[in-house]
Image (cartoon, rainbow, N blue to C red):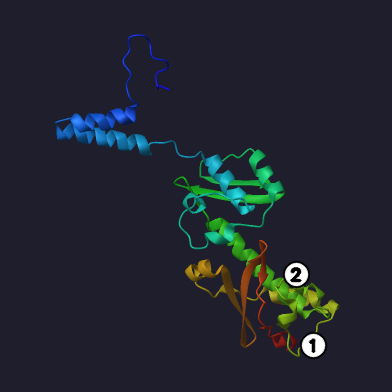
Amino acid sequence: MFENGPVAPGDSLRPPFAVSAFTALESEPFPMKKLILLVAFAFSLTGAAAPEPAEIVRSFLAYQYGGDVPGFDKLCLPNPDLWMLRGRDQPGKRRAVAQHQISVGPNGVFLDLVAQDVCVVELKDGRVDPAFNLALVERMHQKLILEFLYHALLPAQNELRRFVTNAANVSLGEARRAGRGDMDAYADLIALIPIVRASDPVADAQSQSVSYRMPLGSEIFTARLVRRDGVWKIDTDRRLEVPLKFFWR
């Protein structure tokens, strides 16, 4: 197979360009010409076309829906929390991503409804800036913790298992339970409680977990979140004390 098609009668056979370049370097007596050839050859290796923005976005979204994307960390700007972005395996949504017409705006932002989800991806210098996506993950974490507290106040805690890894290890103390007629007021109160990250991002990447802390009266409640089968839950593999006395003041 030759670069310029079949060899005509009488033509001499030549090796491909890259081999020719190295052959020239072997015999060239002038150092400057050697340098020029080296630079030209290096440029030919690094000058491959970069992925199109739409394909970068498509790969990023496929990863969020549980797909295997080799070199995902190189697809994004450096961030120790990248591990959080991979969701549970959803082949149907990956197919929707593959079929979706992706258009990236001149500011590098893609925002559209894909498979009934609002998807956002921001590109900077040809790579994904995951800041928006990680902000959504943190918001989801906080919502999970607040919903857990809400359901902990209910007379029956049947729903707690949706939020924790082992409901049997959740201790709610001796606090009484709220009546369902009071839950609107408690929901408003719970929504006002601030939540901040309590763990180090680099350490979190190693442990595949993230911790948050929040004040409940004079006490601090800390929740450690982990993923189980692609779903985020509060880690209660060990006993977790939830101080609820604050709500009965």
Furthest residue in direction bottom, as rendered = 174
Answer above or below: position of 200 versus 71: below
Q: Is the C terminus in the top left, top right, bottom left or bottom right quadrant?
A: bottom right
**Depth order, front residue of 175/225:** 225
Query: Number of marks in the image?
Result: 2
The three-letter amino acid code for the residue at tag 2 is Arg
Q: Could you tell whether 206 is left or right of 142 in the image?
A: left
The reply to whether residue 229 is in sight is: yes
**Where does residue 172 sit, x and y in percent of width and height?**
73, 85
**Where does residue 224 sit, x and y in percent of width and height?**
61, 74
Q: Nearer the viewer, mark 2 or mark 1?
A: 2
Quarter holding residue 49: top left
Q: Secondary structure at mark 2?
A: helix
Answer above or below: position of 130 versus 53: below
Specify which label sits upstream in the sequence, 2 or 1: 2
Q: Is the N terminus in the top left, top right, bottom left or bottom right quadrant?
A: top left
**Where does residue 118 sit, x and y in percent of width and height?**
66, 51
Q: Could you tell whether 188 is left or right of 142 in the image?
A: right
Q: Could you tell whether 25 is left or right of 51 in the image?
A: left
The three-letter amino acid code for the residue at tag 1 is Arg
Rounded to the nearest angstrom, the CA distance separating label 2 from label 1 is 22 Å
Instruction: State the residue position of label 1.
Output: 176
Mark 2 nearby-residue class (10 Å; few <14, some 14–19, many ≥20): some
Identified at 79% across, 87% down, the residue is 176
Instruction: State the residue position of label 2.
Output: 162
**Depth order, front residue of 168/195:** 168
The reply to whether residue 115 is in sight is: no
**Where does residue 4 sit, x and y in percent of width and height?**
39, 18
